[in-house]
Image: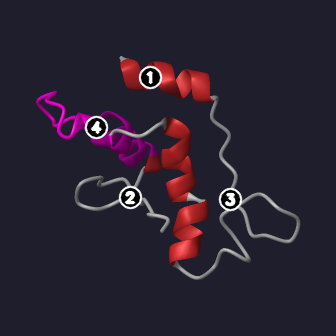
Amino acid sequence: LPVALSTDRPFDPVGNPLFSVQAAVERKTRLGHVIGKAQCIQVEEAFRMHTNYAAFAAFEEKVKGSIEVGNLAILLFIQLILLRLILKS
């Protein structure tokens, strides 16, 4: 069963999905303690959870969630290598 990921206020007051991606990948508290290290996921999986899996959870996988002809899209291009470096710092 796919698990969706999304922004969550007030945790993220600006609604930036990169913060929830970072939280899912690193699983660090504000003090830097890792909680549930075995539950950390890869950056790519976190993006799938924000896109494909979120569309599935909303019963909208036929019209959004993936880049396909005819699908609705809001595109944001991020170099995954750069994102990985940011997450490690």
**Number of the label disc, if any, that sits on residue 86:** 1
SS label for mark 1: helix
Q: Report how many numbered discs are placed on residues in the image.
A: 4
Residue 3 placement: quadrant:
bottom left
Q: How far apart are marks 3 and 2 (CA)?
A: 16 Å
Under mark 1, the amino acid is Ile
Residue numbers of the magenta segment: 18-39
Q: Which residue is denoted by mark 3 in the rendering?
A: 74
Q: Which residue is denoted by mark 2 in the rendering?
A: 7
Disc 4 residue crowd, few under 14, some 14–19, many 20+, Cα 10 Å: few
Q: How far apart are marks 4 and 3 (CA)?
A: 32 Å
Question: Which comes sooner in the sequence, label 1 or label 4?
Answer: 4
Q: Per the image, is 27 magenta? A: yes
Question: Which comes sooner in the sequence, label 1 or label 2?
Answer: 2
Q: How far apart are marks 1 and 2 (CA)?
A: 19 Å
Return the x and y of residue 66 as percentages of the image width and height: 71, 60
Question: Which comes sooner in the sequence, label 3 or label 1?
Answer: 3
Q: Distance between the residues labelled 4 and 2?
A: 22 Å
Disc 1 residue crowd, few under 14, some 14–19, many 20+, Cα 10 Å: few
Question: Which comes sooner in the sequence, label 4 or label 3?
Answer: 4
The reply to whether callout 3 and callout 2 are in contact (CB within 8 Å) is: no
SS label for mark 2: loop
Under mark 2, the amino acid is Thr
Return the x and y of residue 81 as percentages of the image width and height: 59, 22
Under mark 3, the amino acid is Ile
**Image position of 49 with respect to 62: above or below:** above
**Image position of 10 with respect to 72: above or below:** above
